[in-house]
Image (tube, coloured by chain):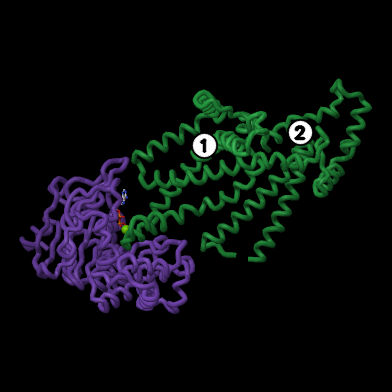
Chain colours: A green, B purple
Amino acid sequence: MISFIGRSAVQKMITLFFVSIVSFLIIHLAPGKPSQVDPMNPKFTPEMVERFRSEFHLDKPLTIQYLYFYRDLFTGRTVSWKDNQSVLLKIWERFLNSLPLFIVGTILTWTLSFPVGIRSALQRGGNFDRSSTFLAYLLISIPGFFFAYVLIIFVVTQFQVPVIGMETFGIGSTSPMTRFMDRIWHLLLPSVLGATAGIAVLSRYVRSQMLEVEGQDYVRTARAKGLPPDQVHYKHALRNALLPFVTMFGLILPGLIGGSVITESIFSWPGMGRMAYEAILARDYPVILTVNFISAVLVLIGTFISDLLYLVVDPRIRL
Amino acid sequence: MTDNDVLLSVSDLRIHFRSDNGLAKAVDGVSFDVGRRETVCIVGESGCGKTVTALSILGLIPIPPGIMAGGSIGFDGIDISSLGEDDLRTIRGNRIGMVFQEPLTSLNPVFTIGDQIGEAILAHEKVPQDEVHTRSVQLLKDVGIPSAESRLQDYPHQLSGGQRQRVMIAMALACHPDMVIADEPTTALDVTVQAQILNLFKELQKKRDMAVLYITHDLGVVANVAERVYIMYAGIGVESGRTAGIFQTPRHPYTQGLLASLPTRSKRGQRLSSIPGSVPNPARKPPGCPFHPRCRYSVETCRTRFPELCDYGDGHLSRCPVLYERRETGGS
Ligand SMILES: Nc1ncnc2c1ncn2[C@@H]1O[C@H](COP(=O)(O)OP(=O)(O)OP(=O)(O)O)[C@@H](O)[C@H]1O
Ligand SMILES: [Mg+2]
């Protein structure tokens, strides 16, 4: 066990090292420059461009730049090229904004997909299965942004509630209770929207997984023993059907930092996804690279958690 | 055998499956009886409907795609083919135990052996946990698993194929059933292990006073275990009778072919014969006698008329009128 953790940690560090090199190279070798050092930018004189270049170490070879960047990152000194603010602080603020969206969305996705998928599988071909299949395909095929606008129009016209942003503008002076309810209300639509596609896909996956397991020999054995249907389905079948989802569970971690560009843009939500997107447009290298690095770390931690979980739930896997 | 001694009585069972290329008549007219404490074999080539027959006794055929197209199954005076799920459950594992063909996949990989055996007991009897434990240990000992106590904590993947099949047998015996159905219990195992499992069945049958319905494709094991034999071909019963009678004077060309293809001491050094052709697809069975395309005695009527059962006395029945007539005119 200890050796597994140790080995895994070393492997993941090596992976992380290569990820850092590759992402650094991709960003620096991609066409385009930050506007501050673009010689075509009429706002800046050649002297100013030169000053920026040396300040950002852009005049040094890539290897040196790489070392500078990761030195700054690990000492927490990285600043955004756009506004000279600490990158980690910016990310932290945005992260706090995205977090409620992520948590509510994830909870909705995971708590709804499983009951729906399992019930569809157990009543295969029945009314519930058919309507949930229809709905799932509908939600998968309608583009998210379109669905979002339909939802917004519906909510705004029916309930006269503004749904854009994280809270109603100027609400700061009212009672905490009103503020809280306002927050919740603003949270609802984006997280439901963010979760719908996930629910549609995941419930289908749960259904097919459950159907596959229901056809296994050991489920037949359970029935041949005379076990009641609940025990056959929810003990023997479900326990096996859940195994692959344990792997997925570790992989939701990177979603913490990814955020959703589309949902956040539609609802003017000041979250991580939009920050990263804007940083890419502005070629704000430090922000992009930091977000990239943190998500790589989260992916690796996520896979590590998956491995550990698998170890716990599948007795066939031993170290 | 009087009616009172008959434990299981299957008559004219027909199980069909709806499939993309038509109706597959997997079982299409099979009848057999199993007496109390009797061992009966069902023999037939792969795909002839043995597993489907066995599963239908316990109501384990998935419907749909399966269809119970006819026949009835009586068990100890109850018509179990008309029972609902809840009533069937009181029979499954309790009065009839079942051992499957594939020991490797028939145990649930994520639960311990002890859990799976204990659960078989608890499904039908309300007993305290420590009694479940002692009974599980005893069951494992009965089926010949060494250090039974510690084995209960093992998961299926920690056991060999033969041991897993022993665990399956232990599970089937958990509630002292009146009958055990063993569906090719040795097919997936090594030859040496096969013999051990076969002996285990013989031993348990005697010790526990139970009936055994032993399904196999290997006529070789039949002489070893069964008092009576039913031969199946393409979903129908073609010949049945006492084991000795069938081995001495097989009355159906298919049985004769099967026996001729068995390696025996007297045939040492000779080439083994085999039956030409192969089992028809259950969705595209030939009309008339399903065996006629492979039969060297086939005559014109075999192509069109479904053969009736011919009685040779002493319970020996065969579905080949052609050979039956020859016998009466002294032809054979
Ligand atoms: N669930 C099912 N759906 C459709 N067809 C089926 C189903 N189960 C069995 N069959 C068909 O019924 C026929 C008989 O199958 P069965 O498993 O009873 O053969 P078997 O005699 O047990 O063969 P083997 O010796 O290989 O185990 C096969 O042709 C099979 O394709
Ligand atoms: Mg079979």
The answer to whether A59 is drawn above or below residue B241 in the figure is: above
Q: Residue at x 79, y 39 (%)?
A: A286
Q: Are marks 2 and 1 in contact (CB under 8 Å)?
A: no
Q: Which residue is mark 2?
A: A30
Tell me which amino acid carries mark 1. Answer: Thr
Q: Compare residues B8 and B94 and report the one nearer the observer.
A: B94
**Residue A177 figure quarter:** top right
Q: Is residue B264 left or right of residue A188?
A: left
Displayed-image quarter of ligand 2: bottom left
- Furthest toward the top, the residue is A42
Q: Residue at x 28, y 69 (%)?
A: B220
Mark earlier in primary sequence (2, 1): 2
Mark 2 → mark 1, Cα distance in angstroms: 34 Å
Q: Is residue A137 left or right of residue A319?
A: left
Can the viewer see residue A106?
yes
Subunit that carries the residue with mark 1: A
Quadrant (top left, top right, bottom left, bottom right) of the N terminus of chain A = bottom right
The secondary structure type at the circle numbered 2 is loop
Can the viewer see residue B248?
no
- Please name which of the two marks, 2 or 1, marks the residue nearer to the observer: 1
Subunit that carries the residue with mark 2: A
The secondary structure type at the circle numbered 1 is helix
Q: Compare residues B31 and B211 and report the one nearer the observer.
A: B211
Q: Residue at x 7, y 63 (%)?
A: B330
> For residue A196, which numbered disc appears in the image?
1
**Residue A4 figure quarter:** bottom right
Residue B127 picture location, percent across and down: 34, 72
The residue carrying pointer 2 sits among few (fewer than 14), some (14 to 19) or many (20 or more) residues within 10 Å by Cα, namely few
Q: Compare residues A181 and A108 and report the one nearer the observer.
A: A181
